[in-house]
Image (tube, grey):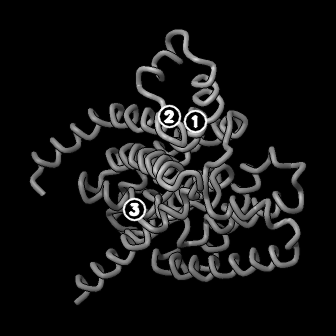
Amino acid sequence: MNIEVRTRRRRWGFILSPFLLLFVALFGISYGSVSISIKDILEVFFSEASQLDETIIYQLRLPRVLIGLFVGACLAVSGALLQGVMKNSLADPGIIGVTAGGGLTASITIILFPQLSYLLPVSAFIGAFIAALVVYILAWDNGASPLKIILAGVAINALLGAVQNGLMVIYSDRVQAVLPWLAGGLKGRSWHHLSFMIPYAVVGLCLSFFAIRPANLLLLGDDSAKLLGQKVELQRFFIILLAAFLAGTAVSVAGLIGFVGLVVPHVIRLIFGEDYRILLPLSAVGGALLVVFADTIARSLFDPIELPVGVLLACIGAPFFLLLLKKRRMIER
């Protein structure tokens, strides 16, 4: 791609990002089983408005939209980091077992220890971290190659899925509490959920900026990075740990939402290039936009039934994943 064209795209990407975030936030607040006009939304925020509009916006839609923004940003940044460190555009927190690890420990908390629900982000992170650590250890052989990490991740993903299914069979009387969460969605999310998610999300997203330089150096290849004095394995471990933390944070609130970490970074990379100084922040924006937009469509299109956003995103992401596989096969030929 021409350097001038790419520079122009990046400039416009950063200029348009805040406007797109504002647009999708207003879209999420406005649409639903009860539509609220932009004029009424502005009245709620800046002047007197009807009690019904205030209740719908402040108690139902605003916290849900804010949670969607943070969930999407965390998942997309997690996917971008994993794709870079593994040098594989098909890497994703869900594919290599990170999301499954967070999902399993969160399910255990919901089913066995409901009184500890306030520790859901912590338990999801612990599960995601343990899954990432096990994958890394299994892939280690004088270094952890990206291909081995992917293969080990797929195996761990299958194992954790089997354990979770077994847990649900054993405690079948409590499954109803966890089923909506497993489908992935933002239904019923409130200021309470936002308040315990924000510290983890902010810390993880801020730490991700410290991963920009090592991620860019790892793109050069392990040998080149070592020649530049980089501790490759330590940096790779830090990035995988950070990706697990971000995925666990998102999973703890929104459940098993897939494909955001796969689709968004890949699209951003195709449009704006590999540089993580551009890729990471724009992936965060893209993930936030996708989740809030998809969630609004999912709860509006099938009214009065609310479709979990995880189901809708899977319907979008799975065909995209198949297209990626086909594209890779054509390239290999």
> Which part of the image, by quadrant, shows the C terminus?
bottom left
Circle 3 crowding by C-alpha within 10 Å: few under 14, some 14–19, many from 20: many
Rendered residue at 42%/50% (across/down)? 290
Q: Amino acid at mark 3?
A: Val
Residue bearing the label numbered 3: 263
Rendered residue at 30%/80% (across/down)? 328
Q: Is residue 71 above or below residue 164?
A: above
Q: Is residue 197 left or right of residue 266?
A: right
Q: Position of residue 193 (x, y in %)?
A: 70, 40
Which structural element holds mark 2? helix
Residue bearing the label numbered 1: 61
Which structural element holds mark 1? helix
Q: Amino acid at mark 2?
A: Ile
Q: Position of residue 235 (x, y in %)?
A: 51, 57
Q: Earlier in the sequence, mark 1 or mark 3?
A: 1
> Which part of the image, by quadrant, shows the N terminus?
bottom left
Which structural element holds mark 3? helix
Q: Nearer the viewer, mark 2 or mark 3?
A: 2
Q: Are marks 1 and 2 in contact (CB under 8 Å)?
A: yes
